[in-house]
Protein backbone atom coordinates (compact mmCIF):
# COMPACT_ATOMS: atom_id res chain seq x y z
CA UNK A 1 0.00 0.00 0.00
CA UNK A 2 2.79 2.44 0.80
CA UNK A 3 4.35 2.04 -2.66
CA UNK A 4 1.13 2.98 -4.44
CA UNK A 5 0.82 6.18 -2.37
CA UNK A 6 4.35 7.27 -3.34
CA UNK A 7 3.66 6.78 -7.04
CA UNK A 8 0.59 8.97 -6.90
CA UNK A 9 2.48 11.79 -5.19
CA UNK A 10 5.31 11.74 -7.74
CA UNK A 11 2.87 11.72 -10.62
CA UNK A 12 1.07 14.75 -9.26
CA UNK A 13 4.41 16.62 -8.95
CA UNK A 14 5.24 15.86 -12.57
CA UNK A 15 1.81 17.00 -13.64
CA UNK A 16 2.49 20.40 -12.04
CA UNK A 17 5.63 20.92 -14.13
CA UNK A 18 5.10 22.58 -17.46
CA UNK A 19 7.30 23.20 -20.47
CA UNK A 20 5.92 26.70 -20.74
CA UNK A 21 6.80 27.86 -17.22
CA UNK A 22 9.03 30.93 -17.16
CA UNK A 23 12.65 30.25 -16.36
CA UNK A 24 13.67 31.59 -12.97
CA UNK A 25 17.35 32.07 -13.79
CA UNK A 26 18.13 33.97 -16.96
CA UNK A 27 21.74 34.61 -17.88
CA UNK A 28 22.27 38.14 -19.15
CA UNK A 29 25.26 38.65 -21.42
CA UNK A 30 27.35 41.75 -20.98
CA UNK A 31 27.42 44.36 -23.71
CA UNK A 32 30.35 43.67 -26.05
CA UNK A 33 30.70 47.39 -26.82
CA UNK A 34 30.75 48.56 -23.18
CA UNK A 35 33.55 46.28 -22.00
CA UNK A 36 37.00 47.69 -21.32
CA UNK A 37 39.02 47.77 -24.54
CA UNK A 38 35.95 47.59 -26.78
CA UNK A 39 36.03 49.24 -30.23
CA UNK A 40 34.60 52.74 -30.59
CA UNK A 41 31.25 52.97 -32.38
CA UNK A 42 31.75 55.29 -35.34
CA UNK A 43 30.24 55.57 -38.81
CA UNK A 44 33.72 55.16 -40.35
CA UNK A 45 34.31 51.81 -38.61
CA UNK A 46 32.57 49.71 -41.28
CA UNK A 47 34.03 46.40 -40.14
CA UNK A 48 32.31 46.81 -36.76
CA UNK A 49 29.02 48.03 -38.25
CA UNK A 50 28.76 45.03 -40.59
CA UNK A 51 28.59 42.70 -37.57
CA UNK A 52 25.36 44.36 -36.46
CA UNK A 53 23.60 44.36 -39.84
CA UNK A 54 21.70 41.42 -41.37
CA UNK A 55 22.27 40.15 -44.90
CA UNK A 56 19.26 42.20 -46.03
CA UNK A 57 20.77 45.38 -44.57
CA UNK A 58 18.56 45.68 -41.51
CA UNK A 59 19.91 46.63 -38.09
CA UNK A 60 19.92 43.65 -35.72
CA UNK A 61 17.92 44.09 -32.47
CA UNK A 62 19.72 44.38 -29.15
CA UNK A 63 17.99 41.29 -27.74
CA UNK A 64 19.93 39.21 -30.27
CA UNK A 65 23.26 41.05 -30.14
CA UNK A 66 23.08 41.75 -26.35
CA UNK A 67 24.16 45.36 -26.84
CA UNK A 68 23.11 47.91 -24.21
CA UNK A 69 20.45 50.51 -25.04
CA UNK A 70 22.89 53.39 -25.12
CA UNK A 71 25.29 51.60 -27.46
CA UNK A 72 22.37 50.34 -29.60
CA UNK A 73 21.31 53.94 -30.21
CA UNK A 74 24.88 54.89 -31.13
CA UNK A 75 25.07 51.90 -33.46
CA UNK A 76 21.83 52.73 -35.23
CA UNK A 77 22.82 56.37 -35.73
CA UNK A 78 26.25 55.45 -37.07
CA UNK A 79 24.79 52.76 -39.39
CA UNK A 80 22.33 55.28 -40.79
CA UNK A 81 25.12 57.82 -41.33
CA UNK A 82 27.23 55.22 -43.11
CA UNK A 83 24.25 54.38 -45.34
CA UNK A 84 23.75 58.05 -46.24
CA UNK A 85 27.41 58.39 -47.18
CA UNK A 86 27.23 55.12 -49.17
CA UNK A 87 29.90 53.46 -47.05
CA UNK A 88 27.66 50.44 -46.49
Image: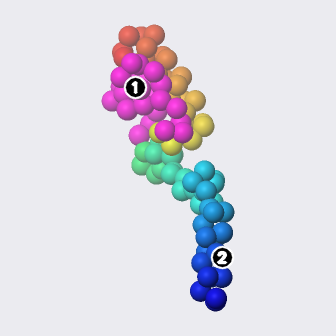
Q: Label 2 crowding class (10 Å Cα cut-off): few <14, some 14-19, many 20+?
A: few
For mark 2, what is the residue? 9
Q: Residue at x 46, y 33 (%)?
A: 41
**Residue sticking out furthest to the left:** 47
**Label annotation for residue 13:** none
Total marks drawn?
2
Q: Quadrant of the C terminus?
A: top left
Classify residue 73 by image quadrant: top right
Q: Which residue is drawn at 51% across and 51% down?
A: 30
Q: In which quarter of the image is the N terminus?
A: bottom right
Q: Which of 76/6 is in front?
A: 6
Can residue 35 be seen from the camera position used here?
yes
* Secondary element at image label 1: loop
Classify residue 58 by image quadrant: top left
Is 55 in the magenta? yes
Task: Give x and y (percent) for residue 82.
Answer: 43, 17
* Secondary element at image label 2: helix
Can residue 45 be seen from the camera position used here?
no
Dominant secondary structure of the residues highlighted in magenta in the image:
loop
For mark 1, what is the residue? 54
Q: Which of 4/20 is in front?
A: 4
State the CA–CA distance, disc 1 to disc 2.
Answer: 51 Å
Above or below, 13 relative to 78: below
Task: Give x and y (percent) for residue 65.
Answer: 47, 39
Q: Residue at x 60, y 50 (%)?
A: 20
Q: In this picture, which residue range is highlighted in magenta?
A: 39-64
Above or below, 72 relative to 20: above
Amino acid sequence: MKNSNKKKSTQSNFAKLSIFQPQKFKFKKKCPLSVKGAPIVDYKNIKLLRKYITENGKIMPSRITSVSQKKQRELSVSIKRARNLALI
